[in-house]
Each structure stands twice: as C-alpha cells, then as structure tokens.
Image: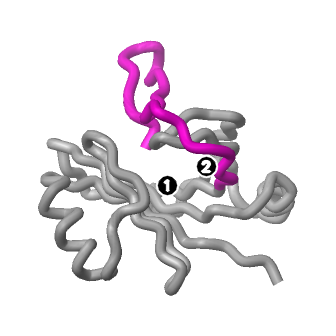
Amino acid sequence: MRKFKFHISLHVSNMEKTVNFYKRLFGQNPEKTKPGYSKFELENPGLVISFIESKEQSPHFGHMGIRVNSHNELVQKKKEIKSLINIELEENNTSCCYAIQDKFWVKDPDGYEWEVYHFLKDDESIGGKQLSGKELVGCC
C-alpha cells in the first residue's frame, strides 16, 4: 500500500502569531522557517502544512497538495487521473517554497488548486514564476 502525506498551504496575515499557535496545537516546532514562510511536517496525522505571509487575503486560502514518495509514484498518479481531471500545469525540477520539486497541478470545480508533487531537495529560494510576462510572484 502506498503512503501519501496530505499537504495544505495557507496564506496568513501574521507569521509569528501563526507559528506560535501551531507550535502549541501540534506540540512541535516547525520543520522549516524562512522570512514570510514556515512549514510543519507531522507524522500522525500524516500532514505537511505550510504558511505564507500575505497582506492580501482572498477567499481561496492558498492550495492543497499530495506529496508522493518517488518520481515513479508521481508518474503513476498523473497517469491515473489524466483521463479524469484536466492537468493545469506540469513542472519539473522547479524551485517552490524553499524546495526543488517535480509536480503537476489540478483545480477542483470551485477553483481550489491541488498540487501532486515529489520533493527532491531543499532550496534556499522561495522560487517564483512569471504571470503573463508581467511580475515574478511566489510559486505558492
């Protein structure tokens, strides 16, 4: 049986207050903390939750994701859903949220974004992408 971890990323208005709250709730320190970014990795329940400080709050809270354990699992998952769900974007060896990842993105009927990704290694850059040739924005 394959094991997956649920991943959710939330936009927050105050990183310090958020980290202090979740340290208490989860009973552990964050796995990674960078300016405007923090991530907790929980084994029980299997959850990766990250927070991105954002002055602009929207009705969409960020994105959700499923982290798989290998490149082969990522390929298999993409194969399983490709005929059922439109894949919005595929990214390989991309820098995102202080990590290098291979991933693909889908949206639910309400526009909530999900990423299915394989973590490759830590990175010292939050990463980013161009929006219609305009400004560089954070990937998350």
Disc 2 element: strand
Work out which quarter of the rendered image holds the C terminus and state it: top left
Q: Nearer the viewer, residue 125 or 66?
A: 125
Residue in the picture at 69% in, 43% down: 102
Q: Where is residue 26 in the image (x, y as percent from the top left)?
A: 33, 80
Q: Residues within 10 Å of mark 2 (few under 14, many from 20)?
A: some
Q: Where is residue 76 in the image (x, y as percent from the top left)?
A: 85, 61
Instruction: Decide if residue 89 is on the left or right side of residue 110.
Output: right
Q: Position of residue 130 (x, y in %)?
A: 47, 21
Q: How crowded is mark 1: few (under 14 residues within 10 Å), some or many (20 or more)?
A: some
Residue at label 1?
113
Work out which quarter of the rendered image holds the N terminus and state it: bottom right
Q: In this view, does 47 lie above or below 129?
A: below
Residue in the picture at 15% in, 52% down: 13
- The magenta region covers 117-140
Residue 123 counted in the magenta span: yes
Residue 74 quadrant: bottom right
Q: Which of 73 and 107 is in front in this view?
A: 73
Colour scheme in the image? one colour
Residues marked 1 and 2 touching at CB (< 8 Å) = yes
Q: Is residue 4 above or below residue 64?
A: below
Disc 1 element: strand
Q: Where is residue 93 in the image (x, y as percent from the top left)?
A: 69, 34
Instruction: Decide if residue 99 is on the left or right side of residue 76.
Output: left
**Label 2 is placed on what type of residue?**
Trp
Q: Earlier in the sequence, mark 1 or mark 2?
A: 2
Mark seen at residue 105: 2
Residue 89 counted in the magenta span: no
Residue in the picture at 32% in, 43% down: 34
Q: Which of 79 and 38 is in front in this view?
A: 38
Q: In this view, does 27 lie above or below 114?
A: below
